[in-house]
Amino acid sequence: MTVQRRTFVAAAALAMAGITLPAFAAKPLVIGFSQVGAESEWRTANTVSIKDAAKKAGVTLKFADAQQRQENQVKAIRSFIAQKVDVIAFSPVVESGWDTVLREAKAAKIPVILTDRDVNVADKSLYVTLIGSDFVEEGRRAGRWLVDYAKKQPGKTLNIVELQGTVGSAPAIDRKAGFEEVIKGNPQLKMLRTQTAEFTRAKGKEVMEAFLKAHGKNINVLYAHNDDMAIGAIQAIEEAGLKPGKDIVIVSVDGVRGAFEAMMQGKLNVTVECNPLLGPLLMQTAKDVVAGKPVQKRLVVEERVFPAEVAAKEFPNRKY
C-alpha cells in the first residue's frame, strides 16, 4: 500500500470515528519590500508603519534598505524574484530606469506595488497600483499658502529660494511643478535660486548656507521639499544671525513632529502634510491583489495643511 493510500485510509477511519484533523494553516503571504533609505523622519515613520502592519497582518516581510541608491533597489527586486515572493513592493529612489527589472518581475508572474513614489515606464501594466500622496497637489498647497501670505504684504516682492529633493525622484519633480504652477505669473513672488539638498538635514543646512552667502538678506522665503531639509536650513539661518520664520518665511512639506516643534518655536511657518503611514493599506492591497480582487491604479491618502497657528493644538495628535 502506498503512503498516500495509507494516509487516506487512516483519515477515513478517523472521520468515521467522529475525529476531525486540524486544517493545515494557510501559507503566510510573502512580500519583498525595497525602501529608499532612512534619509528623513518621514522615511523612518514609513518604514515603521510597513513593518508593524506586516506583523499585525501575519505577512512575512522581506525588507531591503536601498540607502538611496537605485542599483541597490534593482538588486533587491531581482533577489525577491529569485526567492519567488508573492508580491514585490518598493518606493523608487528615482522615476526612470525601471523597465527592465519590472519586466523581469512580470515574466515571473509576481505583481508589483509602488508605494510613495511613481515610476516612469512605457508599459503601465508593469505595476498593479501606486499607493501614496499626490505630490503635485502638495506643491500646489505650499504655493497657495504662500500666495495668500503675499496678499497680506501688498506691493512687496518676496524672493524665494527652493531646496529640492533627490534629483529625478517623483516628489522632487512633482512638488516643484505644483508649486511653480501656483506662483507662476504672480508679480510679488520671484524665484532666486533652486537646488537639490537630497531630502536630508545635513544637505539642507549646507545648501542654505550657500544661498545665504550668495543672496543674504535678499532672501524672503524658503520653500523646502521636505521638513528635514527645512530643519537643516533653519540651523543655517540662525547661524547667519537671522530669525527663521520671521526674517525668512519657511514653507515645507511632510508634517513630521520635528516640523511641528519648529512651528511651536516660531521658526517654521507652515508644513504641508505627506502621510507616511502606508503600511496597513499596503498589506490589504497586497492581499487583494493575490486574491484576484480588482485594485485601483492609484490609491491616494488623505492629507492636510498645518500653519504654525495650529501647531500646538495638533502636536499631541501626531503619530510621526
Image: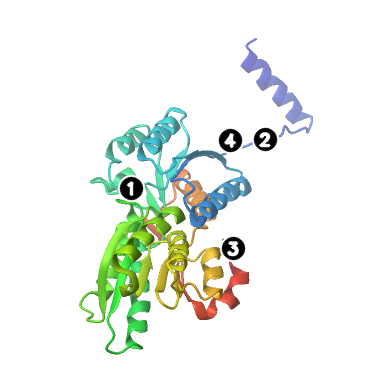
User: What residue is shown with label 1?
Assistant: 94
- In space, the residues marked 1 and 3 are separated at their CA atoms by 27 Å
Q: Of the residues shown, which amino acid type is indicated by label 4?
A: Lys
Residue at 37% across / 69% down in the picture?
222
Q: Choose mark 4 or mark 3, whichever is in front.
A: 3
User: What residue is shown with label 2?
Assistant: 23
User: What residue is shown with label 4?
Assistant: 27
Q: Nearer the viewer, residue 81 or 164?
A: 164
Is label 3 in contact with label 2 (beta carbons under 8 Å)?
A: no
Element type at mark 1: loop
Q: Choose mark 2 or mark 1, whichever is in front.
A: 1
Q: Which mark is residue 255?
A: none
Residue at 28% across / 48% down in the picture?
124
Q: Which mark is residue 319?
A: 3
Q: Of the residues shown, which amino acid type is indicated by label 2?
A: Ala
Q: Earlier in the sequence, mark 2 or mark 1?
A: 2
Q: Earlier in the sequence, mark 1 or mark 4?
A: 4
Q: Earlier in the sequence, mark 1 or mark 3?
A: 1
